[in-house]
Amino acid sequence: MKKLFAIIAAVLISAGAYAQIEHPVTWAYAAKKTSATEATLLLKATIQPGWHIYSLNVKEGGPIKTAFTFAKSKDYELVGKPVEPKPVTKYEESFKMDVSYFEKEVIFQQKIKLKPGAKLTAIKGQLEYMTCNDKKCLPPEDVDFSIPVGK
């Protein structure tokens, strides 16, 4: 009886170990220098089929919008706000409103100005986003990032 219990427990534990946590979005980062004192940060989301993430511009009462927070530094300053390409906008019954979102992939951009004498090698920050498909939404995720900035 003890052997049978041990075997059942081992099978259940093994099955639980193989259960996947869903992560339908992967992020990649880059910086493109546009001059000696300016650069554009690129934050790319690759989204699995059937899933989407929300725009930077979602009205109150809707899903969690995508948002970026950049660490403060004496070496650079943000120029304007992050920008995004044109999103898909549709009515979502679960939120009872029109929402804007991206499927497959999206590249968000943030311009920065490097300050004189900057010794910057990377720009750090955090992003928050929410992922949904036509059946469910996953809890919002916070992701730390570090974007290499060439000299």
Image: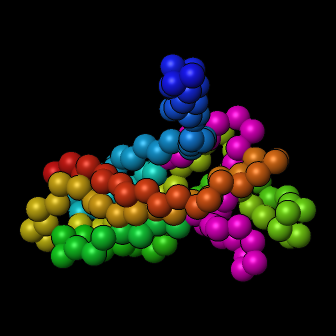
Which residues are the magenta region?
44-66
Q: In this view, does 86 lie to the left or right of 123?
A: right
Report the coloring of the rendering: rainbow
Asked whether residue 111 appears in the rendered view, the answer is: no
Q: Where is residue 103 in the image (x, y as percent from the top left)?
A: 69, 44
> Could you tell me which residue is drawn at 71 percent across and 55 percent down?
137
Q: Where is residue 146 in the image (x, y as percent from the top left)?
A: 30, 54
Of 127 and 139, nearer the camera is 139
| Residue at the bottom extreme, as displayed | 60
> Could you tell me which residue is drawn at 65 percent across and 62 percent down?
55
> Could you tell me which residue is drawn at 47 percent across and 61 percent down?
142
Q: Where is residue 21 in the image (x, y as percent from the top left)?
A: 56, 41
Of 136 and 70, nearer the camera is 136
Quadrant of residue 57 within the rendered picture = bottom right
Query: In the rendered structure, does residue 54 fall within the stretch colored magenta?
Result: yes
Of 14 and 137, nearer the camera is 14
Query: In the rendered structure, does residue 98 fall within the stretch colored magenta?
Result: no
